[in-house]
Image (cartoon, rainbow, N blue to C red):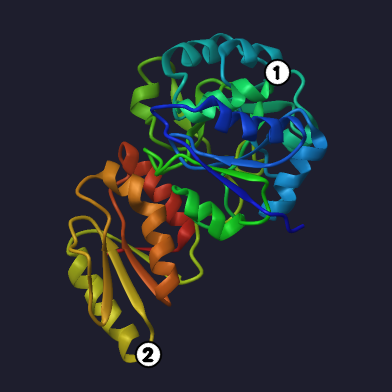
Amino acid sequence: MRIKTRVVKVNPENLEENKIGIAAEVIKKGGLVAFPTETVYGLGADALNEKAVRKIFEVKERPADNPLIVHVSSVEQIYEIAQPNKVAKKLIDAFFPGPLTLVMKNKKVPEITTAGLDTVAIRMPDHKVALKLIELSETPIAAPSANKSGKPSPTKAEHVFEDLGNLVDVIIDGGETKIGLESTVVDTTVYPVEILRPGAITKEELEEYVDVKYAEDFSVAKSPGMKYRHYAPDAETIVLVGKDFFKKAMQIAEDFVKKGYRVGIAGLNLEDKRDEVIYKNLGRSLEDMAKNLFNVLRELDKECDVIIIQGVEEKGIGKAIMNRLYKAGRVFRI
């Protein structure tokens, strides 16, 4: 299915409704629109239109038992499609709009969107473009990340075009995303609530409102990111966790270079430079690393056979970073 993708550039701080309206008309007609959120770019279709949602799975080459997150623009829209309990209502009040997805009992979302489950995953993005698109489309929008399944998620419009160009109708280019990792997903149908996928909203923040634990049973995927290989470059990816990262990374890199491999090293507080080995700086903080992670993986994947990347302590947003890195490559403690 090859089509001519239209790229529409918008300023998130100065919305031009006519431009976003072009994309909204595509959603209404059952088409596909890639759009920015505060987390990553999403690949959107009318969540209530089975034929439109099926296109998402086809274009992404996504397994049918991997449910989609439904994006809404208002609390009222949540009640139209789901049945929030008291716990869900408390978290909606505290964190919506924001990078939090809540799994709730489904009311009217088609089985193809929920992967046949009686629950539905819903979030309200904290991004003006995304909210306006949903509002103008007059329907909730189902939207996984706008990339081929298994690849690093897109944080820029050009990432979307690399993966899905001429497979989607419209790409809304709203610049680089703010957070860079997908939303935290929480199952509110059990108590204590379970974190199915860590993200920018941490366990510690959630615990201010409800009792929380991390999910242990992944046999049924209630949300994206639970069952399948995700976020993975084509290059062999090695994650090193512990002290003296750079020293150990260089030792491993030298061995690969001797064998004729192209090697990239990515870590915190590195200077971007190119020698026998390509070095990429992930930033100065864990928040920087979260924002830059997928972009750096994509950049190195274009030039390298092997990527060596710094692992971090699994606290706060570090838990979300490591969740992605465990799925991206092999993790070693040093």
Residue type beneath disc 1: Ile
Q: Is residue 317 above or below residue 138?
A: below
Which x, y percent locates residue 83?
A: 67, 14
Q: Mark 2 sits on what residue?
A: 260
Does label 2 or label 1 sit earlier along the sequence?
1
User: Total of numbered circles in the picture?
Assistant: 2
Residue drawn 23% across the image and 78% down it:
251
Q: Is residue 132 above or below residue 7?
A: above
Q: Which mark is residue 81?
A: 1
Q: In this orientation, which residue lies closer to the viewer: 244 or 250?
A: 250
Label 1: which secondary element: helix
Looking at the rendering, in which quadrant would you find the N terminus?
Answer: bottom right
* Quarter occupied by residue 307: bottom left
Residue drawn 47% across the image and 59% down it:
328
| Left or right of 281 in this view: 192 | right
Which x, y percent locates residue 200?
A: 38, 34
> Quick one: label 2, few (<14), some, or many (20+) residues within 10 Å?
few
Residue furthest out toward the bottom: 259
Q: In this orientation, which residue lies closer to the viewer: 256 or 135?
A: 135
Q: Is residue 282 above or below residue 102?
A: below
Q: In this orientation, which residue lies closer to the viewer: 56 or 172?
A: 172
| Left or right of 29 in this view: 104 | left
Label 2: which secondary element: loop
| Left or right of 328 in this view: 239 | left
Residue type beneath disc 2: Gly
Residue drawn 47% across the image and 16% down it:
91
Looking at the image, can residue 153 be seen?
A: no
Looking at the image, can residue 95 be seen?
A: yes
Which x, y percent locates residue 70?
A: 63, 29
C-alpha distance separating marks 2 and 1: 55 Å
